[in-house]
Amino acid sequence: MSVGTASEQRQFTVLMRILHWLMAAMVLTMLGIGVAMVASLGDYHRLVSIHRPLGIAILIVVVIRFVNRQFSTLPPFPASMSSRERFVAHASEILLYALLFVLPLIGWGMLSAARFPIVLYGPLHLPPILPHSVMLYALLRKTHTVLAYLLFLAFIAHLGAILFHTLVVRDGLFSRMAPWRVHAR
Amino acid sequence: MRLGVIGVVILCIAGGFFYLGGWFSPNALTPARFVDAFERADGVFSGFRRNHAKGVGVSGYFESNGQGARLSKAVVFRAGRVPVIGRFSFGGGDPNVADAPNMVRGLGLLFRLSDGEQWRTAMVNLPVFPFQTPQAFYDNLVASQPDPQTGKPDPQKMAAFAASHPATVRAIGIIQSHAPSSGFDNTAFNSLNAFRFIDAAGTSIPVRWSLAPVQPFVAVTTAATAQTDKNYMFDALISSILQHPLQWHLIITIGKPGDPTNDATMAWPDGREQVDVGTLTLDQIESEETSPARDINFDPLVLPSGMAPSDDPLLSARSAIYSQSFTRRAGEAKTPSAISAAEVRR
């Protein structure tokens, strides 16, 4: 990895990049499974059996990412980005982190409120984290859907912004998170 | 130009997402459309299940004799006692329907295993299920929709459905050859769908299960009818359970290679090995107004480790549709059950 002072560092650390792309793959899979399973009869069970443990895996990875981020030096934004753009980029990061943390917790919580077993694998299951209330389940179930669509929109905005910077502005913003090593120009 | 590329990328991803969500196939059968069909057939009754709406809660325990442990590693089959919550019901979406012996009788059960796992099963008294696929079930719901003019199903649509569904006609023949018993207490209940049991060595076998009542079979008599008491079959269940605990043997039938596991309309041939794995005792009965059974989704795919779904397409569909029905009713105001708390205490 490229080591140097904070001002020279152009990329996120290797661990941060691995976690980012792992998370991207998991979230994209999760969004696809989520929207497909609610419309599915024949594949519902298979999809929901992946959805639950994958959601918990996302919860674990987002916590690791957040903690790791606190102890890591971040590469600077390109000079081409205005302070307003930097603010928007930062706010969208906070939104993504928040959704990736809250969505699995709401999923866990809604199944808890319905006293539905939260099976991860084989006999391994999670304990309930909320009191038994079907009204609460119904509320959280709706919230889960609304926030999942919000996450999809946030993901599209994130992707759109990075494509815009890479293809139109061409300021090398993408290279900060590129899965490969990018040398300083 | 470059903006166009970005647009195309985003449209492709959004399109893929909406494709997976079924937005481009508005006629495909989904859990929501299935539950809509139940609602069109019977109406919407706030807080009630969209099918098997009329019911009463029960509880008791399952005493495993240990005989099932060689078939499945599920903790429930180790010798010992497991608490059970259940619900007796009639098929159909009307929670105030008058009791009648020819209606489908259901028994949903939730076993609380000692390691925190659960086994849920929703059984009915039919020997086989009338429909092979979710689509057939749905098409029948639509075909048997009462005509607004006559208040009865259109005989032409019913005949057309029967003509195109020979498996259903065959299954109804089997169902009609089994005379129903007089009440819930002496009813045999069946899993209908095939499942798989997995033993400690990882060997998987096809199974079906049924509950054989200890209470002796009594044929339906014409003396008792709903004319005097709309809930007479539930009331008979209440008085019988208050007199003495009701018991059923849990019988596991083991399929042989070649026995259909993906077709609930077909019975397995006679002579299959059957294992009595224990006794279900139900000794408490409670109105849905107070029973925890009201808030349970008896999803047939809540299975402990050691049990798994078969390749029957109905199983995943049942899980999806029960979930949809549960989600709808969970958020609605609860209205009193026909089998009220006062009725149970009487």
Image (tube, rainbow, N blue to C red):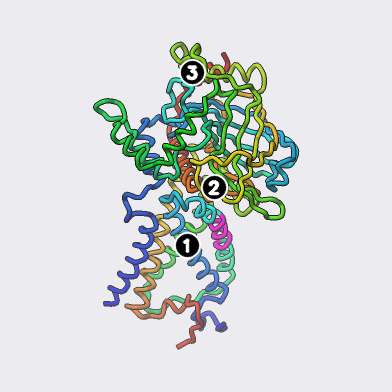
- Residue sitting nearer the eye, B195 or B268: B268
* Dot 2: element: loop
Residue type, numbered disc 3: Asn
Q: Are marks 1 and 3 in contact (CB under 8 Å)?
A: no
- Residue sitting nearer the eye, B299 or B187: B187
Instruction: Write down the chain letter for disc 3.
Output: B
**CA separation in Å, label 2 and label 3:** 36 Å
Q: Which mark is residue B261?
A: 2
Whether discs 2 and 3 lie on one chain: the answer is yes
Image quarter (top left, top right, bottom left or bottom right) of the N terminus of chain A: bottom right
x 55%, y 83%: residue = A2
Reply yes or no: does residue B218 show up in magenta: no
- Residue sitting nearer the eye, B164 or B141: B164
- Mark 3 neighbour density, 10 Å: few (under 14) some (14–19) many (20 or more): many
Residue type, numbered disc 2: Thr
Q: Which mark is residue A29?
A: 1
Magenta span main SS: helix
Residue ID for mark 3? B231
Segment tinted magenta in the rendering: A53-62
Instruction: Tell me residue A143's x, y (percent).
Output: 44, 47
